[in-house]
Each structure stands twice: as structure tokens, then as C-alpha cells.
Image (spheres, grey):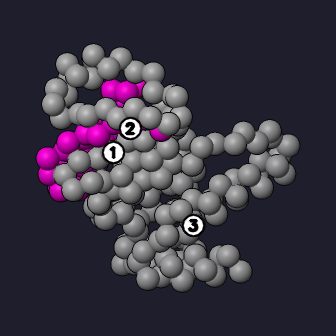
Amino acid sequence: MEQEVFYGEIQSGHLEQVGYDTYCNLLDEVVKEMKGIEIKQETDIQIELNVTSYIPDEYILDSNQKIEVYQNIALCRNEEDIQNIIDEIIDRFGDMPQELENLIDIARIKYLSKQINITKIASRKTAVVFTFVQDSLKIEISELIKRYGNKIKFSSGIKPMITLEIGTTNERQILNDVTEFVKNLR
């Protein structure tokens, strides 16, 4: 039943991010349970960036193959996983369209963010807001100020936040700047 729901969403060229991630996480948990691997609860990260990220229908025609690729991307946990999926996609389907490259960049941002307790990354006009798990912001603020100057703002509270001014709505620039910023937080 769930597969039919996802099939319909994928066919339209758009995928409900939260619903699909939940589906992949459940699938991953079932596989781990069957193998007797202990399941560690992971914090789900919401990524709401103003970028186009999906697999175009004309790039992968078969819906089952498309679901498999979405699942493989959602299950990436490190850079090696990302590189393996990129190699596999190019080998099977040819050069990737920009929308798919964006989707893979979002998967990269997601696994990097889990390592530093980010719970949400969201676009706000020409800025991006990074929200952290309660009381988990343990970074060298002076180093960030040296690097980014007045492009960053800090908000303390129950869930600390950092706002990074990107200064553009260019998708490639947003993804590059967010990836670099998250790497600098590590």
C-alpha cells in the first residue's frame, strides 16, 4: 500500500521529502532487525532549501528503478556512500541532470548535519537558518566570526540557531555554501 502512495508521488516528478525519508528509515530498520543489528534512533533532519531536487521522469523512466535510486540516496551515511551512488547512477543512466545532483548534495548535507546535531536547515529569502538540538551548539564562535564576519547571526534559546546570509537565490551557490558551512561547523 505505501509503495503505491510513493509511486504516485514519484510519477508526478515530485516526492514528499518527509514521507519518503520516513519510508526509507522504516525500511532500513526492518532490514537491520532481520539481520539482528541493534537499531540506534537517529535524529531526523528537516532540510527546506529553495532548490529543485528530484529525479526527472525522462532521466529514469522505470518507476521501480527510480524508487531504488531514491532509497539508495536516502540511505547514504558518509562520503563513500555518496560517491558509490554517484558512480552507480552515472554508470547505469548517464550524466546526471542538475535536479538529481542537487538531491545528492542534500543527502550529503544531511549526513554531515547529523554529526553536529543540526535538526533543521531552512531557506529564508537569501539566508539559511541552521537549528540545533537543544543545548548542543558547541562550536568555536570566534572562529566562525573570523571566517564569516557579519554574514552570520547567532540566536540562543531552547533550540540554538545560526543564520547564514548567502546573498543569492542561485541553487548551486546555496548548496555549495551550506555544505561548506556545515563542514566548518565540524
Q: Is the residue marked by circle 2 packed among few (<14), some (14-19), or many (20+) residues within 10 Å?
A: many
Q: Earlier in the sequence, mark 1 or mark 3?
A: 3
Say which residue label 1 marks: 129
Residue 177, image x and y in percent?
A: 25, 41
Residue 17, image x and y in percent?
A: 49, 64
Q: Residue at x 49, y 76 (%)?
A: 10
Magenta segment: 159-186
Q: Residue at x 38, y 38 (%)?
A: 161
**Can residue 87 be seen from the camera position used here?**
no
Q: Residue at x 44, y 35 (%)?
A: 157
Task: Judge whether 10 appears above or below 32 on screen.
Answer: below
Looking at the image, residue 125 sits to the left or right of residue 57; the answer is: left
Amino acid identity at mark 3:
Gly
The Cα atoms of the two marked residues, 1 and 3, are separated by: 22 Å
Local secondary structure at mark 3: helix
Amino acid identity at mark 2:
Met
Q: Image quarter for residue 24?
A: bottom right
The Cα atoms of the two marked residues, 3 and 2, are separated by: 25 Å
Say which residue label 3 marks: 19
Residue 141, image x and y in percent?
A: 32, 20
- Tag on residue 161? 2
